Amino acid sequence: MKTVVALYEDFNTARDVVEDLVEAGFSRDRISLVANDASGEYKRYIGTDDDDVSAGEGAGFGAVVGGLIGLGAMLIPGIGPVIAAGPLVAGLTGAAVGAAAGAATGGIVGSLVDMGVNEDEAGYYAEGVRRGGALVTVQIDDNWENRVVDIMSRHRPVDIRRSAEEWRRSGWTGFDASDTSYSAHTTGTQSAQGTRTMSQGGHDNEARLQVIEEDLQVGKREVERGAVRARTVVEETPVQEEVTLREEHVKVERHPVDRPVDPNAVEMREQTVEITERAEEPVVAKQARVVEEVVIRKDVDEHTETVQDTVRRQDVEIDNMGARTGQRTFESYDTDWRTHYNTTYGSRGRDYSVYMPAYQYGYMLASDPRYNQYRTWSEVESYARRDWETRNQGPWEDFKDAIQHAWNRIRNAVS
């Protein structure tokens, strides 16, 4: 079981949330409401001027908020005067007794933690009530979470985390159950899930909900998809060539002889003879030559690409489907819905959660006063189909059997 929690700016808004939850079929004994009453303006709902009343004296308050179990008014440590109803009352009762004895025990924080709320966030919600807000909690099974969140979000709950950040910037350090500076100042920032207009008298005369659509805007931007880098490198490769070289060598040879000197020969004198030896050696020269060119360029191609995405639409659903007197809650028929699902859809390979909205639609359809004059399914089917398809909840033929079954089940039960 899960607990869905939301904080609202005032009691009137929280009361509307409770009434919507009850009309949608959620059990009254699982819904709680705790509202700050530092100004004392809500005492009229419980029919007494005392700051602390018993559960019996507070029963009138329960009637005001959708028939919830009412406790009435009490004084909570760290928060001050509140009016409260529902399962949270048990924890608050202990807190009220502790306050009378000077002890800060129990309270909203403890009750919320027992329900599974994070302790830090429980402190935020308690501070929000102290600052004039109204708290609504709903205990549900897991498969009802989306439906409850949708209903509670329509009434612009306070963004509790943003509010806590603003409080801290103003010097707040955390919820203090011993604080006695009770007041009714504002709780903080709201979420942007719709606008609610109040009349000068403080009552809800008009509700404005925004229908929002997303447009798909496709542009283009330049991104890097890769690159080619070219650079020159110098490599050394050993090479060899053969060349023929000539060398000269002077040789001196002495030969013995024995002959007279020719009288006509040159007279004897000193003389010098030089013979030079020559040799060839290799001479190396290198010349650079272009043997290849590398050309780098970019080619530009254009192509058309189909962009696929989803766009959201926030629409406004009108559920004017108050439960008939004595009518059972939608949850109480869960076994019936599952039996019909197993018989009709079990072999189609789709989970029960896919068809649950169809059973819920049929349940609410049977409770809608607009269709009270129709007694048979054939009379109401065309209207039901048009409303279903307007909400874009899936092909009518896929879910018609589930809707008709729920409609017949409720109409037969209350006829």
Image (cartoon, rainbow, N blue to C red):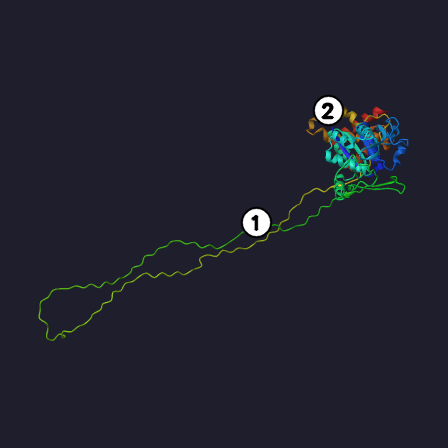
C-alpha gap between disc 2 and disc 1: 58 Å
Residue 307 sits above or below residue 285 on the image: above
| Farthest residue, direction front | 102
Q: Inspect the image, locate mark 2, and give the three-letter code of the amino acid beneath it.
A: Thr
Q: On the image, numbered disc 2 is attached to which residue?
A: 343
Using the rendered image of the protein, determine whether residue 400 is visible from the camera's viewpoint.
no
Image position of 16 (left or right of 168): right
Q: Earlier in the sequence, mark 2 or mark 1?
A: 1
Using the image as rendered, state which of residue 306 and residue 15 is in the foreground. Answer: 15
Quarter of the image where one finds residue 273: bottom left
Quarter of the image where one finds residue 173: top right
Q: Secondary structure at mark 1?
A: loop
Q: Secondary structure at mark 2?
A: helix
Image quadrant where one finds the N terminus: top right
* Circle on res. 226: 1
Instruction: Residue 334 in the image: state x and y as whole percent.
Output: 76, 25
Q: Inspect the image, locate mark 1, and give the three-letter code of the amino acid beneath it.
A: Gly
